[in-house]
Image (cartoon, rainbow, N blue to C red):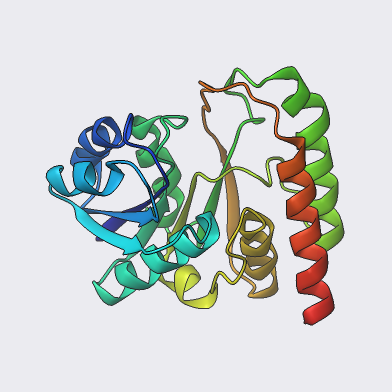
Amino acid sequence: MKTFCVIPAYNEAETIAKIIGEVKPLVDEIVVVDDGSSDQTKELAKAGGVKVLSHFINRGQGAALETGNQYALKAGADIIVHFDADGQFLPKEIKDIISPILKKEADIVFGSRFLGKKSNLPPFKKYAIIPLAHLVNKIFTGSDLTDPQNGFRALSKKAAEKIKIEQDGMAHNTEIISKAFASGLRIKEIPVTVIYHNFGQRFSGGLKIIKDLILARLIN
């Protein structure tokens, strides 16, 4: 089965080359979606010998993932892995997150920081932002996944075809979960490691996610 890794990147010049180098041996193809970066992200990604798609403006992580998904599907992907460009995830865990799909046990697999592996979560994120995200996720999707805002996931071709990401920003995490359940896809969570290099507390980002979800619900 052909595995593609979609990496959304916005001003990730410091880490993108390292991430590409570590992920490249583990998948069949990497697709970097440069989301309107103002630094050398795009040039460094191209130098890494991978497919690079570009947004002229910064549209948001959700939009970048959808751009990558559509390219991967057209290029013949059987599995699509979503992987961040900032070094928070461990490339060696890609094999773990695609394993349930390869074994035909799941259509979509979500990584979780709360299933056994330790992650150095900042206290404010652990005790305020994550519980809030969990509550919002339960309200909007009815699901009880342990880590609704984790961006490390794998989708089968079937799942990627059924889930069109319409939330351009960070609310796409909840949207993907909602559409996975609504589509009747087989869902699995597995433990993953998340390493935090920047401990900035962005509570405003959480509030924006909630606003985006409410607006989407009103529109639909």
- Quadrant of the image occupied by residue 73: bottom left
Q: Looking at the picture, how far across and down is residue 141, in whole percent?
A: 78, 62
* Residue 141 can be seen in this image: no
Please determine whether, in this image, residue 183 is positioned above or below residue 88.
Answer: below
Q: Quadrant of the N terminus?
A: bottom left
Q: Looking at the picture, how far across and down is residue 183, in whole percent?
A: 63, 75
Closer-to-camera residue (164/202): 202
Q: Looking at the picture, how far across and down is residue 22, in whole percent?
A: 25, 32
Please determine whether, in this image, residue 17 is positioned above or below residue 205.
Answer: above
Closer-to-camera residue (10/190): 10
The residue that appears at 73% across and 28% down in the rendered structure is 125
The residue that appears at 83% across and 30% down in the rendered structure is 128
How many discs appear? Answer: 0
Closer-to-camera residue (144/219): 219
Q: Residue furthest bottom?
A: 220
Closer-to-camera residue (132/9): 9
Q: Quadrant of the C terminus?
A: bottom right
* Residue 67 can be seen in this image: yes
Q: Looking at the picture, how far across and down is residue 109, in whole percent?
A: 52, 52
The residue that appears at 84% across and 77% down in the rendered structure is 218
- Quadrant of the image occupied by residue 149: top right
In the image, is 14 to the left or to the right of 25? right
Please determine whether, in this image, residue 172 is positioned above or below residue 164.
Answer: above
